[in-house]
Image (cartoon, coloured by chain):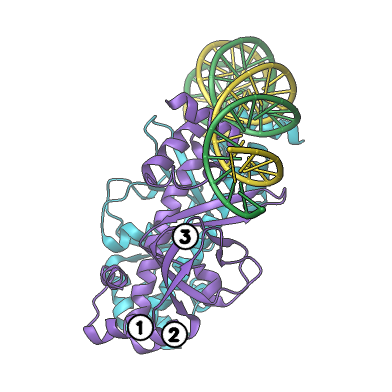
Chain colours: A purple, B cyan, C green, D yellow
Amino acid sequence: MKELIDYILRFGNLNKQQTDLIASKAKKFELKKDEYFSEAGKIPKQVGFVLDGVFRFCYFNNKGEEITNYFIDGISFVIDYQKFHSQVIASEYIQAVTDCDMLIFSKKDWDELSNTIVGWDKIEAKIYQKCMTEAIDRRSPLVSEDATTRYLSFIEKFPNLVNRIPLSYVASYLGITQQSLSRIRKNIR
Amino acid sequence: MKELIDYILRFGNLNKQQTDLIASKAKKFELKKDEYFSEAGKIPKQVGFVLDGVFRFCYFNNKGEEITNYFIDGISFVIDYQKFHSQVIASEYIQAVTDCDMLIFSKKDWDELSNTIVGWDKIEAKIYQKCMTEAIDRRSPLVSEDATTRYLSFIEKFPNLVNRIPLSYVASYLGITQQSLSRIRKNIR
DNA sequence: TTTGCTTTTTACCATTTGTTAAATGATCGC
DNA sequence: GCGATCATTTAACAAATGGTAAAAAGCAAA
């Protein structure tokens, strides 16, 4: 639980009473490898906070190919932000890539934090903005780089991931086929 | 000025006194084609609102190539959000691609809005979140699509841009060379 | 119009990536 | 351990894209 509070306090100041309230709303939760935290076609009902494990955001394109948009490795919120807040059905999946330890907040409890803690909205906005900026900063350069460069920067950004997750996920994140990725990995050695 | 207030009111309710305050802070401003609204190496000092014209976000990679990250066409805020709010030097450029009519707010005036108008921060956060979601939703699919598909979705998303801006910008946005883009354009006809 | 400059197109060849298929490795339940 | 299944690698060929250079087209100033 300390991980959560430490994380939040990096984005704003809260007193003990406030952090206790937050902690009281967080429920321990475990997700097994391959299970979904949020699914396309369903309204996201929870906010997650990853204590340990890897998640990925993914969707299917019109050719039925699975595209990985993003990975989350360890300490971080995991949430389909827009869809959760507007309570609209999601269009992408959030899947556990490994067994995951997490904390979850129900929509009701999360709303209560917003209504009870002065400044909570601002903290939440800051956290979201940091995550989005990070996501777009990682994702954007991929468009103009060749596959080898993309793979190298993937390793740099997610150094702990390569040997823990299926390479097919990495390939779909990099926008190349598994075969290409395999070839690239061979040439780098 | 009506465009600005209409735009803002889509994200929250404000009374006349509040919208008048906002309007009083906005200064008319014109930027000529090719001029920069914000530059790498400088701290962003202004928030812009585009009334008419096209902007692009761009930067230089380590090979000296110019990469276009994003276009803004008409009615929208234009701002290097993170760098403006943290008052840190920017790492990318925001350039007028055509002559532009805009409104600008100084950092001082923008902060004053935040301190004076209750709920302003929440509205600003909503606007930012919408823009970021839009940006990432447009940018992300580009990674896994081939160049022709990327060009077609560019035309779809920015239908008014193709014949108003240099194709070199489009190519750098799509992550391909001008020659490839030219070839693709020929094959589509 | 002409001139000079920039943008866009074209062509040729090298390189990268995709496609298909098969072989090898790894994992899981029996 | 054994077979079944899934993940990964390898190979050969096809298709797409990049690099370079040069020609063509567009544009603006004299």
- x, y percent for residue A91: 63, 64
- x, y percent for residue B13: 48, 84
Does label 1 lie on the same chain as label 3?
A: no
Please determine whether, in this image, residue A12 is positioned above or below residue A180: below
Image quadrant assignment for residue C16: top right
- Residue for point 26% across, 59% down: B87
Count of numbered circles in the view: 3
Q: Which kind of residue does numbered mark 1 sit on? A: Ile
Q: Quadrant of the C terminus of chain B?
A: top right
Residue with the mark numbered 3: A99
Residue with the mark numbered 2: A109
Residue A79 is left or right of residue B165, and the answer is left
Chain at numbered mark 2: A
Chain at numbered mark 1: B
Q: How far, Cα to Cα, is label 3 from label 1?
A: 46 Å
Q: Which kind of residue does numbered mark 2 sit on? A: Asp
Front position in the image: A101 or B26 = A101
**Residue lying furthest right in this view?**
B189
Please determine whether, in this image, residue B144 is positioned above or below residue A136: above
Q: Which mark is residue B117?
A: 1
- x, y percent for residue B171: 56, 37
Instruction: Check disc 1 and report its element: helix, strand or loop.
Output: loop
Q: Which kind of residue does numbered mark 3 sit on? A: Asp
Q: Nearer the viewer, mark 3 or mark 1?
A: 3
Q: Nearer the viewer, mark 3 or mark 2?
A: 3
Front position in the image: D1 or B39 = D1
Does label 2 lie on the same chain as label 1?
A: no
Front position in the image: A69 or B8 = A69
- Structural crowding at the residue carrying mark 2, measured as other residues with C-alpha within 10 Å and reported as few (<14), some (14–19) or many (≥20): some
Instruction: Check disc 3 and report its element: helix, strand or loop.
Output: loop
